[in-house]
Structure formats: C-alpha cells, structure tokens
Amino acid sequence: MTRAPLRVLVDDAVAAAPPSPLAALVGSPRAVRLELARDMMLAVPAGVRDPLCLVTSGQLSLGVFHPAALEERAQPQRDATRGEEDGTLMPPGPLARAASKNLALFCDGELFNLGALPAHDGDGVTAAFALTRAEVVLIDAAAVRELVLRDGALEQALARALALTNARLRGITGIKHELLDFYVRNGLSVAGPTVRVRQLDLCIDCKQCEDACEERHGARRIVLGGFELGVLDFVYTCRTCSDARCLTPCEHDAIKRDAATGEVTIIEDRCIGCSLCALSCPYGAIDMVNVAEPELASFSPAFKARLERGGKLGFGPGKGRKAPARRIANKCDHCAGYAEQACVSACPTGALIEIAPATLFRERGVATGARRKRLDMLPVAPFVDGINVTDSGDARVRIRRVSRLLWLLGLGTFLAVLAEVVLRWKWPALSVSYHLLRRDGLPPELAEMNVSFLAGSKLALTCGYLGTALMVLSMAYPLQRRTRWFRRTATNQFWLDVHLMTGIVGPLYIVLHSALHLTTWVSVPFWSMTAVVVSGAIGRYLYTLVPSLSNKHELAILAHRRAITEAAVDHPAAAEYALAAIHREGQHARGAWHAGLLALLPWVLLDDVRRVFSRRRDRRALRRVAPRRVARALARRIDRVVFFERRAQLAPRSAAVLKAWKRVHIPFSLVLLVTMIAHIVLVLPQLF
C-alpha cells in the first residue's frame, strides 16, 4: 500500500521530539485500542463520543447493510470470531459481500472521523467493519480537543490528514462508487501483489491458458469467466490474499503460506480431501480433484499420475495422512518452481497478464518524497477502453519483434511480386523480366514482346509454389495446439502470428498464380481459401468484439446515468428531462429488441439517422431549463446512453455468429487442403 496520509503529515511534525503527543494519546486511557477479527463490525465502546479512528494495521471498509442481513450474520460472526482463535471453525463468507454497497476503504495509518459518519443510509444501516485482521485506535473527541489546544503542530497535522481523507472520499462519485464497491466486494483490496487478469478485448477464447495449466499440473488451476468489470475479467484463480481465508479451517496443515515467497500452497501429501479450504475460498480458486473413482467426471488421471510420480498419495504410519485420500485440493501457486507461468506464457494474444490491483484501482495518490503525485482516482478508462498490455516480459517482446519481421518479409515479398506483375501487364519495358531479356541479348522490341504474365508462366508457377507453401505453413498453428512435441518449437503467440500472416499472404499469391482466372474448378482452392480467411477474420474480430461490447457498454451506460443523477442536485429539471428522454428512447426501441441480428442491425443504423433530429430537440428542451454548458453535457450523455444501449443489444445476437464461425472455417480448410492436393497431383505430370 502507499504511504498513508496521516503518516505523511504527522511523522514530520512530531518525529523530532519523541515520544510524540499522538503516541502519548494513543497509549492514554482517553484512547481505546481495539483488535478486530476479520469481518468484525467496529463497535464504539460506551463512554467514547464522536471519536477519531486511527487504523494502525489492516483494512477497514465502510458499508451499507440491510438490518436483516446484519441479523443473519450475527451468530455466524460470533462463531467465526471464536473459531479463528483455535482454527477449528470455517468462517462465513466476506462481510463485504453482505453489504448492499461498500462506500470507503481505510488502510494502515489512515485517520478518519468516525463520529461524522451517518448512522443510516437511504438503503440501510451504515457500519464500519474489518476486511482483514485489523487494529484501530478510537480517540475521544474531547481528548482530541484537549490535545490540539496544547500542540499547534499536531492540530495542523490532524486537520490536514482529515482534509485529505475527506477530499478522497468526496472524489468517489458516480461510477467510481461502482469501482470501489467491486474492488472491496471481490477481495481485490486484500489480494497479493498481483492478480491474473484477462483482457476481453484481446482474448480470442482459445482456452490455451486453461489447457496449458492442465497439461502442467494434471488439472486446471485457472478458469476463465470470473468477476468481470468492463473489458477486464478477474479470472477464477488464486490471488494470494493477505487474509487467506482458506488457511483457517484446515486442521491437517495441508495448506500453508510459504514464508519466503508469501505464496499459499497445498501440501498434497497431507491433504485428506475434506474440502473445507475450497468451501472457505470466496473466489472459486480451489477445486477438489477426485483421485479414487475413475467413473466420476471429476476424476483426473493426469492429476493422479503427477501425484503418484511425486509420491504424494502415500498413507499410513509415518505419512502425512492415515487413510487413502479420495480427493485432493488443487489450487494455483503461480507455477512455483517453474521459470514462468504456464497460462500466461500460453496466451497467443497476450490477453492474460499479471497486474497489480492498485494499478487499476488507484484509490490513493502516490507519495514521492515530500510531494504527492496527483492521479485520477479510481479511473474508469482501464475498464471501458482496456489497458492493452501485451508485451509482458523480454521473451514476449522478442517474439513480437520476430513476428513483425515475418509480416514485413511476407507482405514485402508479395508487394514486390505484385509490382512485377503490374509492370508486365501495363509497362513491360519497366519490368525486371524485360531487363533480364535485354541482358541476354534480345533487341528491345523482341524483349518487350516476350514480357508477359500468364497462368502457366514461370513467375505464376513460383507464386503457386509460394502460396501453397504458405498455406501449408498456416496449418502449423492447429498442429502446434494438438501436438505436444511441436509446442517446443516456438510459442503459441509466434505460431498464431505465423498462422495469420500465411493465411492472408498465401491466398494473395494464389490469386497471382491463377492470373485472375478464377472461374474453373481449379479455382475451388482459392474460393475455399477466401472462405477460410474471411471466416477467420470475422471470428477473430467477433471473439474480441462481442465480450468487449457487452461489458464496456454496461459500464459506460451506468457511468452516464450516474452523472445525470448527480446533475439533479443543481439542475433538477434538466436531469429529470434527461432521464425521461432516455426512458422514451428505451420505449421506442423495445419492440425492436425481439428481432434477430439481420433485422436489428439495419434498424439500429436507421435509428441512428433518426437520432440526428431527436438530438436537436433534446438540446433545445434542455437549454430552456439549464445553462448552455450543462444542457450540452446532458444532451451528450443522453446520446451516449442511447447509442450504447443500441449496441449492447447487438452484442448477444452476434454471439450466435461467434459460435458458428468455426463451422465455416474448419470445413473449408479441409476443402482447401483436398482440392489443393488434387490440383498439384493433376498439374505436376504436365510440368515434368
């Protein structure tokens, strides 16, 4: 975590004269030190009025709870508090998930005015609670007043610290509330240094990350489709949480945190398969793999074989378990003992990365010496526009450079051949062939007459050989995916780039090979290649477009609606009109939402034209009830909401096309291969 406001301000003010007045106050009877277990509510003791709260360790959150939800958690909460002491009881799920919304996050060293927090919100009871084991000091308001009267420097430091906290909390408005709630609710604030994130706008859903993980460990330890926010998917895999709920219920020391690396690992030769660790993990990071019953779907022979090779299934006297295990816990340990993570390395597009949660959810500034760097707090852009991080590591950068070189070589060579063909057709005297004939001694007129480009010419045959070779090379990517020994030749990313390059450049050479005569049966390979390339391009596009459209539009719509609601504070009539206009547009479009993709797409395009006129009407109406600048901003938000809602309806219908594109891509690839071989077999005897 970054250096906290109180530490920044108070240390310099009072460190020169220890023990500081603050330290004396914290140790005095007027201040109450409380130790909070995970998920414990912060209750103010009797006799302490309107206190300042200093978080000395851990994390606190401020949440809104329905009274019934708090009552439902009361008894399990008490049981969990007692159970954590001896490690025998499985704690309930995170209290952050019981909250209807999480409003704020306070970390080590931060100070806030607990007495200024409202006791009730519009949706329920407001309460502070511990996200992790925490220690807080509650300083009575009267004691604070007495202290600051004696120490002016500390008074200024406390005032500045509280002002910074208040400014940060006031900055969490609109869509930023949703980001903060997601950050706290899904355990990202207590996650380890990095988490695994899938960029939906880069992912082609090839599942090679899952396959690579399963191949290495015998059973997959990562599952896509986790907690999604915008175009980012926080996949189901271990986050190395600081509070590690999975450690508490295990009574057999079968899951531990490595003291050197901080990684939480399964001690497989001690696991008895009780499932308590899996049940206690709120993020779906631990699976139980069957190793005793092959007839069950959960049985994994590869996982069992790996355990047997390592001697992890032993039992009896002197072993970690007394009876044979039927199931063994399986979780990600970030490929401990390997040079790289299998899932990240296997991703051919760089969509799966490791990134620090604080990089995405920047809820605080960064201290740099005596100054604080100003940042956009809880920025929306990474979740709407993506982060576009693909080159993670030197090896990936080298592969990307080699891939670019291949693209330059392939396209450059084709353009050179294409230029020669065009010159032979249009300006024969400028072609390379003409100059070669002149060098052989032919006179200019005769040399120009011999310059031509026909389907059976030497250059056309060369184009055919190159096109065929490239198309055969394009088969290396699916071969690499299905053949283990072939994977050692290069990375998935390299072979995907080769697949794309050869799949595009190869057909172009075949076009030149045929000299544009594409009406005979011999042209069947070309048209098959065209279907393969077009379906591949559409499939590649849809695999990134559909998820990003669905997720980013939902977040963008919510952001604009929240901004309109906030504008109601100063301009209620204008905000009311804006919300009514959005509702009116929704009613207008409701009948079209039942149409299929082919019918909905032209309707959306025509509706965009209609919106040009209705947009002007909205602006004129808004200017009558709000200043020009506000009216323009609200009209733009109305337009954005309508636009995104229309496109959001197109996304799920495109999903059907997304699932069907392989039905075109793969069969036509086979047709291409068969007809290409038939063509070569029939033509080769004529050439030799």
Image: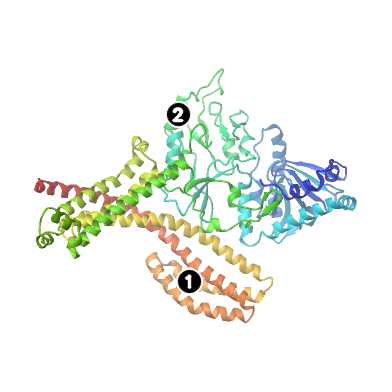
Residue under label 1: 589
- SS at badge 2: helix
Q: Which mark is residue 306?
A: 2
Q: Nearer the viewer, residue 583 or 532?
A: 532
Q: Earlier in the sequence, mark 1 or mark 2?
A: 2
Q: x%, y% of residue 121?
A: 72, 59
Q: Nearer the viewer, residue 409 or 432?
A: 432
Q: Which mark is residue 515?
A: none
Residue 209 in sight here:
no
Residue 268 in sight here:
yes
**Disc 1 versus disc 2: distance between alpha carbons?**
56 Å
The amino acid on which the numbered mark 2 sits, given as a three-letter code, is: Arg
Left or right for 651, reference 439: right
Q: Quadrant where the N terminus lies?
A: top right
Q: x%, y% of residue 37?
A: 72, 41
Residue 257 found in image quarter = top right
